Amino acid sequence: MARLTVSIDDHLAEAFDAWIAQRGYANRSEAFRDFVRAEMDRNRLAAQPEGPCVACLSYVYNHHERDLGERLTRLQHAHHDLTVSTMHAHLDHEHCIETVLLRGPASQVQQFADAMCAEKGVLHGKLNLIGVQEHGPHHHDDDTHGTPHRHVKPVA
């Protein structure tokens, strides 16, 4: 493991320490590593928009909005190759939250998320993209289905 020494002004250090305490990090190093990973991932996805990612899209919507549930479902079906899973929960008499797990090229995932959040009646939407490395199709010796499949792992 490499050791780095970083100098920052006192006000920034105090703010960083407060953020570390608020988030429950054990030390500055863990927090710094998370910042570096996040920035490297953001840069990698920007430089390689067709690179593979996994993502979580969450949005809140008014289920009384005319045909909104059907429009959202139609969009998910139109992008079934990106959609891994969807969870739906009722927040109150009018609002629902859905979380959609996605996998695919980052640019396509981003476009899908933008389309979902742009639907009239969607009140809040947030996408969290994580770049991954994809390993080609293969079989396992103990695979009873015989279906080739892919594995992905986060980029360290």
Image (cartoon, rainbow, N blue to C red):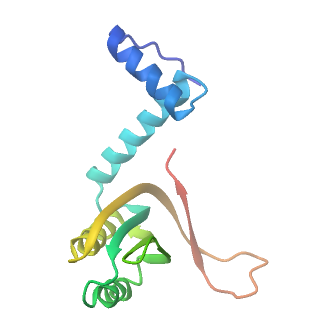
Residue 33 shows in this picture: yes
Image mark count? 0
Residue 123, picture quadrant: bottom left
Which of 71 and 131 lies nearest the eye of the viewer?
A: 71
Q: At which x and y percent is residue 55?
A: 43, 62
Which of 110 and 151 lies nearest the eye of the viewer?
A: 110
Query: Would residue 132 be found to the left or right of residue 79 on screen?
Result: right
Which of 51 and 72 lies nearest the eye of the viewer?
A: 72
Q: Quick one: quadrant of the N terminus?
A: top right
Query: Would residue 138 be found to the left or right of residue 94 on screen?
Result: right
User: Given the current orientation, which residue lies at the most extreme front position?
Assistant: 93
Q: At which x and y percent is residue 127?
A: 35, 60
Query: Would residue 86 be found to the left or right of residue 15 on screen?
Result: right
Q: Residue at x 48, y 36 (%)?
A: 34
Residue 130, picture quadrant: bottom left
Residue 50 shows in this picture: no
Q: Residue at x 41, y 77 (%)?
A: 93
Q: Where 113 sits versus 128, above or below? A: below
Q: At which x and y percent is residue 102?
A: 44, 70
Which of 106 and 98 lies nearest the eye of the viewer?
A: 98
Residue 120, picture quadrant: bottom left
Q: Residue at x 29, y 87 (%)?
A: 71
Q: At which x and y percent is residue 36?
A: 42, 34
Q: Residue at x 34, y 17 (%)?
A: 12
User: Given the current orientation, which residue lies at the most extreme right position?
Assistant: 142
